[in-house]
Image: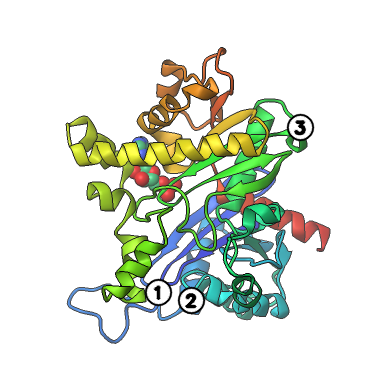
Amino acid sequence: MLVLVINSGSSSLKYQVRDVEAGSVLAEGLIEKIGMGNGGGGDGEIEGPRDHAEALELVDAAIHEALGGQVFHAVGHRVVHGGERFAEPVLVDSEITRAIERLNPLAPLHNPAAVLGLRAIAQKWPELPQVAVFDTAFHRTLPEHAWRYAVPDELYTNHGIRRYGFHGTSHDYVSRQAAALLDVPVEEFDAVIAHLGNGASVTAIRAGQSIDTSMGFTPLEGLVMGTRSGDLDPSILVFLARAGWSPEDLDTMLNRQSGLKGLAGNNDMRSVVEAAEAGDAKAAMALAVASYRLAKYIGGYHVAVGGAKALVFTAGIGENSHQFRALVADRLGALGVELDSVLNLERSRDPRVISTPRSAIPVLVVPTDEERAIAEATAAVVNSGR
Ligand code: AMP
């Protein structure tokens, strides 16, 4: 089955056409500056498409050329927030689209764009099955003691304030790949998965299910990220609000100016590692803060899962930065974790073990592939008529 995978951002649209059975990518691309190119465009500015419908026309033209007459059979959408309702991928109809739209307040930057994408495709190709695959869905198995915040109950009942978790498609895919590599049935797999990209989260897997994860109500909680702070004392926000910071100021500071960027002046892990190696003290401290935070989560989740059978690194940093993996592993001596320094240095696109045979917990690098996971989930839903 050929599946068009769509990842709609507020001003961008990423797409891939995947052959699910062959596991191949037939076309891919990125449309940017949606809704930004008209009216006020300055000198020399390239005009972007007016809206998501117009962006789809560009996608259609590009795909048409790349597929040379073949047609795709379904569309799979990455949807960031599935709230409490969606625990698995679903076939989309207008009621489902409205349900996703009702979740807009929980993911104001992401869900509205997904809704635009769903509606634009329903209009352009009304016969084509569309499937929504949610970033939160894999974490619907969190027990209540893990998803509750210790705040007045009405914040949950009236406002939906609880931990939801994100990156679920990746954590799900990577944990299944890791279980397969270790030859453990996924329903018996206990592990800690660290998805370390520009956004980063770590998940506790017990019996193949997510039982805790570091992102919470929004993708801000938890680890030190490229530009996001992760955990901090909430009183800091009260303190700053009293000092005159607006909600927008706080949002910008926490989501765009913090993390590696706030500590080291750069959100790109490669640059931060290079700067630290060249003797930059701020960069070295940023790496120390980020690796220490992650090591604390790994220790906690090792307890949460009752003894992890694997520690798995994935996404841009997890797959590529042997330096950052080594910094984290160095802090895990108490768990008996021991990296093989040669295996850790090896570069590969394959899932692999990078710990020594003596390591109490095997450490793995497993490349993530969210588009592949979305395409496979879409095909499964369409084939089952769910
Ligand atoms: P992602 O969001 O998964 O694309 O990951 C982006 C992050 O991965 C950025 O911080 C990059 O600096 C980091 N990254 C990508 N390639 C490398 C590499 N070869 N070495 C270190 N970090 C890398």
Measured from the top left, where is residue 173 in percent x and y? 63, 44
Is the distance from the Cβ of mark 2 to the nearest ligand 1 atom less than 8 Å?
no
Q: Are marks 2 and 1 in contact (CB under 8 Å)?
A: yes
Measured from the top left, where is residue 370 in percent x and y? 56, 50
Which quarter of the figure has residue 249?
bottom left
Foreground disc of the pair 2, 3 = 3
Residue plotted at (35% across, 62% down): 236
Q: Earlier in the sequence, mark 2 or mark 3?
A: 2
Disc number placed over residue 52 in the picture, else none: 2
Q: Is residue 285 visible?
A: yes
Three-letter amino acid code of the residue under disc 2? His
Three-letter amino acid code of the residue under disc 1? Ile
Q: Which residue is mark 3?
A: 185
Disc number placed over residue 34 in the picture, else none: 1
Secondary structure under badge 2?
helix
Which of the image's four quarters has the C terminus?
A: bottom right
